[in-house]
Image (cartoon, rainbow, N blue to C red):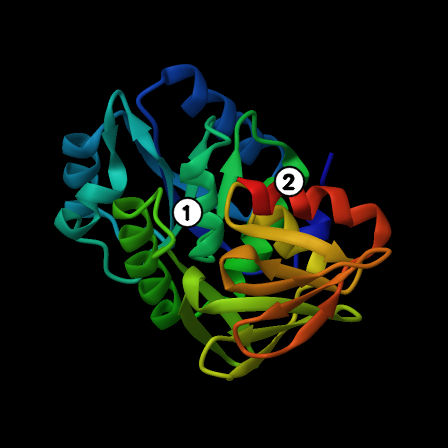
């Protein structure tokens, strides 16, 4: 268990928990009270109406928001909420396309059941996030939710001290650069992002991307030519030729046949 002493030099935060399931609210409340003492819970809400009432009297640092309320998506209600400078951490039991949209948008989330370490890491990331970036990320998230099955979805790429917003269909290929990844776009722009290629490979599952080499993740819609060989190689729409490893050749050919 984390002790109060560990957090003695850490900032204190206020929070509101929003979830339509009482058991989920109770579970998160217990984790916070027992293991994350730098968070003070101001209140709990089971829906949008209760949350609006709480926001009349409170300005929390953090909102823990469940994504789905029955068949309604809380993203659609965000413009109605009088949230000034609150950070938002989504909570969800859904590990599906909604999660993919959240990952693309660089908005933080916790997958239920929520673990202590995951919550602590989310708070640590929250401390480093500016309100301007948070607002931009939420705009991208709303766009991605509305276009959840489309290649027009956008991704927020952290480059230096800013975010570059690009559509998935603009990405031609991603190249490993140690702990970093170089994004090659269709207009020949390049962005160096401080995440490794494996992270993006996981993030792009279900999209038109295929890992063809330990150093390259490609957008198959940008392949112009496949050159046969032991593993072969592909010519991309930008003219770049990328080698295909022998063990990735079969997977690529299957993707191309589809």
Look at 62% across and 56% down and name the residue there.
Answer: 200
Q: Position of residue 32 (x, y in %)?
A: 54, 35
Foreground: disc 2 or disc 1: 2
- Nearer-the-camera pick, 71 or 39: 71
Left-right relation of 180 to 105: right
State whether residue 37 appears in this view: no
Look at 52% across and 41% down and name the residue there.
Answer: 206
- Nearer-the-camera pick, 132 or 232: 232
Left-right relation of 176 to 12: right
Identify the image quadrant of residue 54: top left
Dot 2: element: helix
Mark 1, other Cα within 10 Å: few <14 / some 14–19 / many ≥20: many
Mark 2, other Cα within 10 Å: few <14 / some 14–19 / many ≥20: few
Q: Which residue is mark 2?
A: 254
**Picture quarter with the N terminus:** top right
- Above or below for 191 versus 78: below
Q: Which residue is mark 1?
A: 101
Dot 1: element: helix
Q: Position of residue 125 (x, y in %)?
A: 56, 58
Q: Position of residue 178 (x, y in %)?
A: 80, 71
- Nearer-the-camera pick, 249 or 71: 249
- Nearer-the-camera pick, 70 or 189: 189
Identify the image quadrant of residue 220: bottom right
């Amino acid at each position: 268990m984390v002790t109060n002493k560990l957090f003695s030099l850490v900032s204190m935060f206020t929070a509101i928990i929003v979830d339509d399931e009482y058991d989920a609210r109770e579970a998160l409340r217990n984790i916070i009270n027992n293991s994350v003492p730098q968070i003070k819970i101001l209140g709990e809400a089971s829906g949008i109406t209760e949350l609006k009432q709480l926001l009349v009297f409170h300005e929390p640092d953090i909102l823990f928001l469940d994504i789905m309320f029955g068949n309604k998506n809380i993203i659609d209600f965000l413009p109605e909420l009088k949230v000034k400078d609150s950070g938002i951490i989504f909570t969800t039991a859904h590990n599906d396309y909604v999660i993919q949209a959240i990952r693309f948008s660089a908005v933080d989330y916790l997958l239920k059941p929520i673990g202590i370490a995951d919550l602590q890491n989310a708070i640590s990331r929250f401390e480093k996030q500016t309100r301007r970036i948070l607002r931009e990320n939420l705009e991208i998230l709303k766009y991605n939710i509305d276009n959840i099955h489309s290649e027009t979805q956008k991704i927020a790429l952290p480059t230096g001290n800013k975010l570059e917003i690009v559509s998935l269909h603009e990405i031609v290929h991603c190249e490993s650069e140690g702990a970093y990844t170089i994004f090659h776009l269709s207009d020949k722009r390049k962005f160096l992002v401080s995440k490794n290629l494996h992270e993006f490979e996981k993030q792009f599952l279900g999209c038109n991307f295929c890992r063809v080499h330990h150093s390259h993740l490609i957008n198959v819609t940008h392949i112009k030519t496949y050159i046969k060989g032991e593993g072969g190689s592909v010519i991309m729409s930008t003219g770049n030729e990328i080698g295909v490893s022998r063990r990735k050749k079969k997977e690529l050919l299957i993707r191309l046949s589809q």
